[in-house]
Image: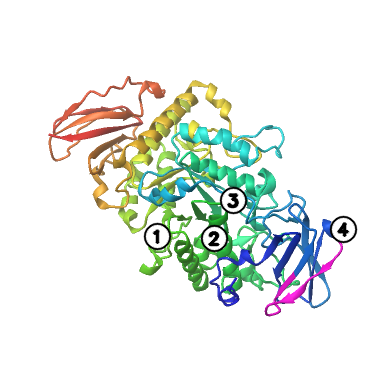
């Protein structure tokens, strides 16, 4: 570790020095506590009696080597403030931790205990950003449970991989995004309020089991993205809060900026040591676990003070984002960085060299809100909101967007995606099929939260597994069959993804039919052209698509096909299309056609 880089916020490998590092015959413990009067290690190896640490380097770092300690030993740091008071803390750089409510760190040989064999995948993953991206967002502990009556019943990393990976492939997902796996104390925070930024949660097993899971995904051509939280951390007293002998080290010293809307502590990005801590954590997951990318949570709260643009930009946090993203790209040129950002800040997905923040993709939360608002509106009132479905293309090319129906949209009284649809039971599923065909034809990569793919009815609850037993009912089984078909169609038709971020890949055919609630547009790439037509009215209507040239339209996918629970026995008979041809569109209907110019 370069101490100058550490203090100036340019270090990315602080975990190589800090934390608990095993050697032949023992372990060296190191921590950074510049304001501490005294620091000791306590652990099961000393019967929890203090083993004094001594100051090293410039006096702000504390170190001790203890023979006989090894992987599996429990430990904490006992940090004394200048006033003589002390607190016991888990290791900020700890590589493994006890299962909550226990709070100790666990010695783990993180460097040499696992040998990755995913070389084939690592050589080819530079191509990931260019093709279709169908992302399955997962909460690891509540996809399936061995015992749904026990909230603490979880599959471990190895067990879940054996059942999850075949499911992902069957349902056409080529990306897996996992909600935070860092160690955290409160299940209800879903991992977003962390106490262990270098420790995979022990809820699901040990670090090597997680590595095995990621390697197994790679063997099956599934990229794995990790949720990463560079904004805030848990307030638990054994974590980062008041770490430095009772003084603020990672967080702001004043209460005005110290706490946020979630009740957690904001990181103080004006401190170089804090930036180096977070950058090192991000690099740690990419380097030592082979994650293919990171999804950065709450980026708007970094761009603006407390996430409020009325308070102005947080220049230090913006510089931190740029330094971190650029440094990660320099070290891992083939990884992907995703921003969850609802602000209108420009340049989020431009490179740092071009004056941007350096992300590869940004969640299009505006598209998500407008789309769901439209479909939650009663069909006979949708004319007033017609342009909620056209507005996204007014700004779309400003950034590289992902279209997300994430966990945030199916909790806290918002209803599941299917239940948001404004109609009775069967009508909800008809609308949802049309909605998803709109989503998958719209430019941008795709993200869906677990359960969306089979029409989950209840809101997500982290204490329960998903309701897979719904698949025994025809309406859910049909919907899942539709979703699988749509996902694989998306993966196999390059017109829907190859030119996602080029104006050559999309153009409107009809986007001004508010009374009819009909939309039509073309998706295209070299060698393929598709027409997508939508009738979001409840009425059957005739529609004459004027493409400006004569062509042959061949139906490829119909949301109202009876094999999906619809009312039409769909066929693929070609249609000679000129300005007089009429397509009959049932209510709540979507259809994709291949376009062959005559």
Nearer to us of marks 4 and 1 is: 4
N-terminal label among 2 and 1: 2
Contact? badges 3 and 4 (CB < 8 Å): no
Measured Cα–Cα span from mark 4 to mark 1: 52 Å
N-terminal label among 1 and 3: 3
Q: Which residue is mark 1?
A: 349
Q: Which residue is mark 2?
A: 283
Contact? badges 2 and 4 (CB < 8 Å): no
User: For the residue labelled by badge 1, is the local secondary structure a helix, a strand or a loop?
Assistant: loop
- Splitting the image into 4 quarters, where does residue 543 fall? top left
Measured Cα–Cα span from mark 2 to mark 1: 19 Å
Q: Which residue is mark 3?
A: 180
Instruction: Assess whether residue 369 is covered by the magenta stretch.
Output: no
- Residue 254 x/y as whole percent: 66, 73
Query: Which is more toward the observer, 23 or 465?
Result: 23
Q: Residue furthest top?
A: 569
Relative to 481, is 523 on the left or the right?
A: left
Contact? badges 1 and 3 (CB < 8 Å): no
N-terminal label among 2 and 3: 3
Tell me what residue is drawn at x 49 percent, y 43 percent: 218
Q: Residue 47 has which mark?
A: 4
Decide if residue 146 is in sight here. Answer: yes
Measured Cα–Cα span from mark 2 to mark 4: 34 Å
Question: Which stretch appears magenta?
Answer: 49-63
Q: Residues within 10 Å of mark 4 (few under 14, many from 20)?
A: few
């Amino acid at each position: 570790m370069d101490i100058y880089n550490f203090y100036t916020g340019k270090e990315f490998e602080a975990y190589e020095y800090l934390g608990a590092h095993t050697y032949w015959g023992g372990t060296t413990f190191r921590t950074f506590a510049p304001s501490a009067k005294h620091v000791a290690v306590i652990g099961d190896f000393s019967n929890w009696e203090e083993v004094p640490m001594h100051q090293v380097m410039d006096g702000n770092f504390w170190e001790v080597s203890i023979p006989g300690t090894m992987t599996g030993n429990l430990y904490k740091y006992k940090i004394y403030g200048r006033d003589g008071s002390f607190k016991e803390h888990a290791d900020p750089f700890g590589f493994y931790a006890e299962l909550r409510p226990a709070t100790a760190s666990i010695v783990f040989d993180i460097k040499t205990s696992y040998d990755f064999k995913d070389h084939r995948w690592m050589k080819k993953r530079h191509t990931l950003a260019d093709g279709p991206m169908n992302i399955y967002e997962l909460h690891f502990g509540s996809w399936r449970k061995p015992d749904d009556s026990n909230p603490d019943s979880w599959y471990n990393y190895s067990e879940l991989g054996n059942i999850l990976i075949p499911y992902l492939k069957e349902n056409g997902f080529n990306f897996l995004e996992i909600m935070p796996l860092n160690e955290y104390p409160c299940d209800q925070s879903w991992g977003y309020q962390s106490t262990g930024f270098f420790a995979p949660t022990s809820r699901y097993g040990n670090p090597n089991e997680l590595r095995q899971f990621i390697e197994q995904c790679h063997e099956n051509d599934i990229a794995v993205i990790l949720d990463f939280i560079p904004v805030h951390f848990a307030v638990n007293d054994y974590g980062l809060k008041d770490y430095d002998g009772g003084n603020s080290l990672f967080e702001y010293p004043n209460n005005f900026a110290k706490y946020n809307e979630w009740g957690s502590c904001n990181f103080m990005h004006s401190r170089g040591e804090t930036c180096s801590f977070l950058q090192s954590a991000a690099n740690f997951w990419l380097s030592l676990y082979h994650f293919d990318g990171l999804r950065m949570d709450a980026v708007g709260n970094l761009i603006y003070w407390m996430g409020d643009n009325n308070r102005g930009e947080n220049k230090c946090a913006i510089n931190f984002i740029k330094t971190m993203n650029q440094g990660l790209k320099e070290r891992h040129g083939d990884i992907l960085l995703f921003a969850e950002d609802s602000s209108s800040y420009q340049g989020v997905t431009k490179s740092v060299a071009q004056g941007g923040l350096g992300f590869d993709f940004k969640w299009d939360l505006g598209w998500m809100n407008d789309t769901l608002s439209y479909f939650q509106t009663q069909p006979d009132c949708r004319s007033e909101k017609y342009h909620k479905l056209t507005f996204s293309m007014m700004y779309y090319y400003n950034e590289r967007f992902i279209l997300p129906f994430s966990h945030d949209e199916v909790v806290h009284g918002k209803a599941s995606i299917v239940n948001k649809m404004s109609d009775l039971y069967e009508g909800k599923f008809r609308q949802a099929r049309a909605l998803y065909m709109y989503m998958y034809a719209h430019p941008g990569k795709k993200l869906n939260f677990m359960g969306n793919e089979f029409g989950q009815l209840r809101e997500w609850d982290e204490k329960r597994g998903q309701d897979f037993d719904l698949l025994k009912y025809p309406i859910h089984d049909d919907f899942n069959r539709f979703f699988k078909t749509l996902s694989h169609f998306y993966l196999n038709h390059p017109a829907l993804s190859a030119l996602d971020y080029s104006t050559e890949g999309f153009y409107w055919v009809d986007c001004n039919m508010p009374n009819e609630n009909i939309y039509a547009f073309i998706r295209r790439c070299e060698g393929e052209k598709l027409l997508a037509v939508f009738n979001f009215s409840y009425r059957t209507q005739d529609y004459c698509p004027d493409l400006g040239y004569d062509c042959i339209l061949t139906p490829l996918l119909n949301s109202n096909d009876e094999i999906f629970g619809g009312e039409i026995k769909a066929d693929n008979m070609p249609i000679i299309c000129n300005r007089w041809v009429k397509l009959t569109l049932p209510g709540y209907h979507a259809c994709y056609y291949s376009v062959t110019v005559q």
